[in-house]
């Protein structure tokens, strides 16, 4: 089935908030429920996968049109954002690459 037809079927027959994974790791499609002002719709959810195979964030970035993805691309490609990240990394405590910190103050029972 062609991609467009698959998406059309998903928007018509899918459940509210249902997620369909894609062949691109960290990219899925979410069926958004209808509201008073708009019918049900679809959004791309981008949440990269870490080296452990789990999503890097609790919630990804939802993108619904070409203008939104262009705006995100422009922000991500801005050199000033790279400088800001470097400054944040200098200020914040070290974190593991997978995004999880190990708590050393855990009460052992």
Image (spheres, grey):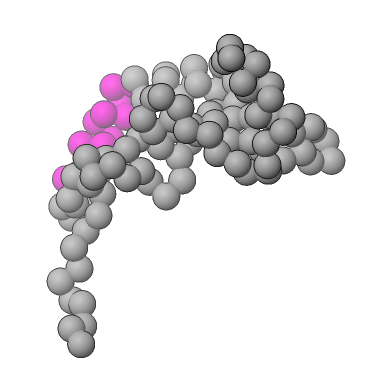
Identify the residue at image location x=20%, y=68%. 103
Q: Which residue lies furthest to the top in this view?
A: 2
Q: Main secondary structure of the magenta part?
A: helix
Residue 45 appears left or right of 31: left
Identify the residue at image location x=47%, y=33%. 21
Residue nearest the viewer, comparing 84 with 71: 71
Residue 31 appears left or right of 56: right
Can residue 60 be spotted in the picture?
yes
Q: Which residue lies furthest to the bottom in this view?
A: 109
Residue nearest the viewer, comparing 69 with 23: 23
Residue 32 location, quadrant: top right
Place of residue 51 in the rendered image (x, y in percent of width and height, measured from the top left): 22, 40
Identify the residue at image location x=18%, y=83%. 108
Residue 14 appears left or right of 36: left
Magenta stretch in the rendered image: 78-91
Residue 9 included in the magenta stretch of the image: no
Residue nearest the viewer, comparing 17 with 15: 15
Q: Residue furthest right?
A: 36
Identify the residue at image location x=42%, y=50%. 58
Residue 79 included in the magenta stretch of the image: yes
Image quadrant occupied by the N terminus: top right
Query: How many marks can you see?
Result: 0
Is residue 109 positioned above or below 47 on the image? below
Image quadrant occupied by the C terminus: bottom left
Residue 18 location, quadrant: top right
Can residue 91 be spotted in the picture?
no
Place of residue 76 in the rendered image (x, y in percent of width and height, measured from the top left): 36, 25
Place of residue 70 in the rendered image (x, y in percent of width and height, measured from the top left): 49, 17
Is residue 55 positioned above or below 93 on the image? above
Is residue 15 positioned above or below 9 on the image? below
């Amino acid at each position: 089935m062609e991609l467009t037809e698959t998406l059309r079927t998903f928007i018509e027959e899918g459940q509210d908030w249902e997620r369909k994974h894609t062949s691109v790791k960290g990219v899925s499609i979410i069926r958004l429920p209808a509201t008073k002002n708009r019918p049900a719709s679809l959004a791309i959810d981008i949440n990269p996968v870490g080296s452990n195979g789990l999503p890097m964030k609790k919630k990804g970035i939802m993108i619904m049109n070409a203008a939104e993805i262009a705006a995100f691309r422009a922000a991500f490609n801005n050199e000033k954002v790279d400088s800001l990240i470097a400054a944040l990394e200098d200020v914040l405590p070290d974190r593991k690459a997978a995004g999880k910190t190990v708590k050393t103050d855990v009460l052992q029972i």
